[in-house]
Image (cartoon, grey):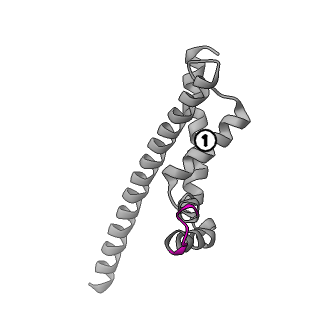
Amino acid sequence: MVLNTQIVWLFILAIPIACIAWTVTHEEVFREPREYCVKRCHEAKSIAVRKFFYLFTCEYCFSHYVTILMLIITGYHLLFDDWRGYLIAGFALVFVANVYMSLFALIRIDLKKVRLEAENEESKKEKI
């Protein structure tokens, strides 16, 4: 695969990785399983069990496993055609996916801030 194509794939494949990792670790649809995992990662006696359940509460950690799955599904590699290409692709995908998730978090914070400011203005107008 040509380097330009590999770079395009890098930025495109990072999108579903970021979406899956963010959804599982932050969104309401997975709240109950996530709360169970949080409880288990704090209360389990074994460090292996605690770390296993922590995996589902941290978007960075979870993105590594989603990336491994995506590499298996797609066979994507970066720079090299052997195992080194998969290794480099894995870490590059995790990095780009986490940049996407950070940007998404910042956008959500800004939107929430604007919404709260608008609600405050509305409540002030109603009091007057």
Residue plotted at (62% across, 66% down): 30
Residue 15, image x and y in percent? 57, 41
Residue 102 falls within the magenta-colored stretch = no
- Vertical order, 24 against 117 (above or below): above
Magenta residue span: 43-48
Q: Position of residue 20 (x, y in %)?
A: 61, 51
Q: Residue at x 59, y 33 (%)?
A: 12
Query: Residue lying furthest top in this view?
Result: 2
Residue 80: image quadrant is top right
Residue 106 higher or lower than 128, as above or below: above
Q: Quadrant of the C terminus?
A: bottom left
In this rendering, the answer to whether 24 lies above or below 31 is above
Task: From the viewer's side, name the closer residue of 60 and 102.
Answer: 60
Q: Is residue 66 left or right of residue 123?
A: right
- Residue 72 visible? The answer is yes
Q: Mark 1 falls on what kind of element?
A: helix
Which residue is situated farthest in the bottom direction here? 127
The residue that label 1 is drawn on is: 67
In the depicted view, which residue is nearer to us: 122 or 71? Answer: 71
On the question of residue 16 being in view, the answer is no
Instruction: Locate residue 26, reporting x and y percent.
Output: 53, 62
Residue toward you, 50 or 121: 50
- Residue pushed farthest front? 46
Image location of residue 72, percent across then percent down: 71, 36
Placement of the N terminus among the 4 image quadrants:
top right
Q: Is residue 44 above or below residue 95?
A: below
**At label 1, which amino acid type do we have?**
Thr
Q: Residue furthest left?
A: 128
Camera-nearest residue between 86 and 115: 86
